[in-house]
Amino acid sequence: GDPYPGQVAQTVAAVLDRLDMAAPVDYEICYQSRVGPLEWIGPSTEACLEKAGEEGKAVLVIPIAFTSEHSETLVELDIEYRAAAERFGVRDYIRVPTVSNHPAFIAGLADLCEAALACDVLCGMNGTDRNCLG
């Protein structure tokens, strides 16, 4: 199966754990950028925004699977989905920036590169034994 939804869920859980909020956080993982007629992961971002509007909630959008600012963040999230949020009556629509070139992100990538070059890690996901260098 596709590891993507599980990886996204694990990342969201780690971020929420790191935030250490006093009260439970009401959240929903939504997906965007469906391409073509194939079935895509759901729920869609638009459906989540519609639900938030119906429930009178504010929305904090975290582009958790995007590391850089590009058309899916700058156009879809910042323009198209913001307009949808307004159309659905979402109380507030706030989008968190991507990690982009944040020093902590760059340091983490550099650490992963060093480990891969030293053959200390495997490239394959979910415990596969594919070597990064071969």
Image (cartoon, grey):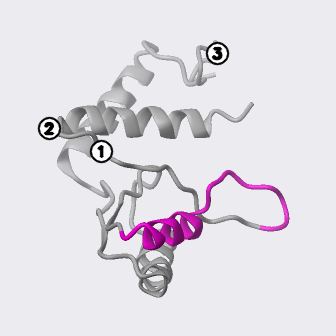
- Magenta region, residue range: 36-56
Q: Nearer the viewer, mark 2 or mark 3?
A: 2
Residue 91 drawn above or below residue 11: below
Query: Is label 3 in a helix, a strand or a loop?
Result: loop
The location of residue 17, given as percent across then percent down, is 26, 32
Residue displayed at 41% across by 85% down:
86
Residue displayed at 14% across by 38% down:
22
For residue 134, side relative to residue 20 (left or right) = right
Residue 22 numbered tag: 2
Which of the two labelled residues, at mark 1 and mark 3, occupies the earlier sequence position?
1
The location of residue 110, given as percent across then percent down, is 30, 35
Q: Quadrant of the C terminus?
A: top right
Q: Residue furthest left?
A: 22
The stretch drawn in magenta includes residue 49: yes
Query: Is label 2 in a helix, a strand or a loop?
Result: loop
The location of residue 113, given as percent across then percent down, is 38, 31
Q: Disc 1 and disc 2: Cα gap in Å?
A: 9 Å
The stretch drawn in magenta includes residue 27: no
Residue displayed at 64% across by 15% down:
128
Disc 1 packing (10 Å; few <14; some 14–19; many ≥20): few
Camera-side residue of 67 and 31:
31
Disc 2 packing (10 Å; few <14; some 14–19; many ≥20): few
The location of residue 105, given as percent across then percent down, is 27, 44
What amino acid type should be assigned to the residue bearing mark 1?
Val
Q: Quadrant of the N terminus?
A: top right
- Image quadrant of residue 97? bottom left
Q: Disc 1 and disc 3: Cα gap in Å?
A: 34 Å
Residue 25 numbered tag: 1
Residue 128 numbered tag: 3
What amino acid type should be assigned to the residue bearing mark 3?
Thr
Disc 3 packing (10 Å; few <14; some 14–19; many ≥20): few
What amino acid type should be assigned to the residue bearing mark 2?
Ala
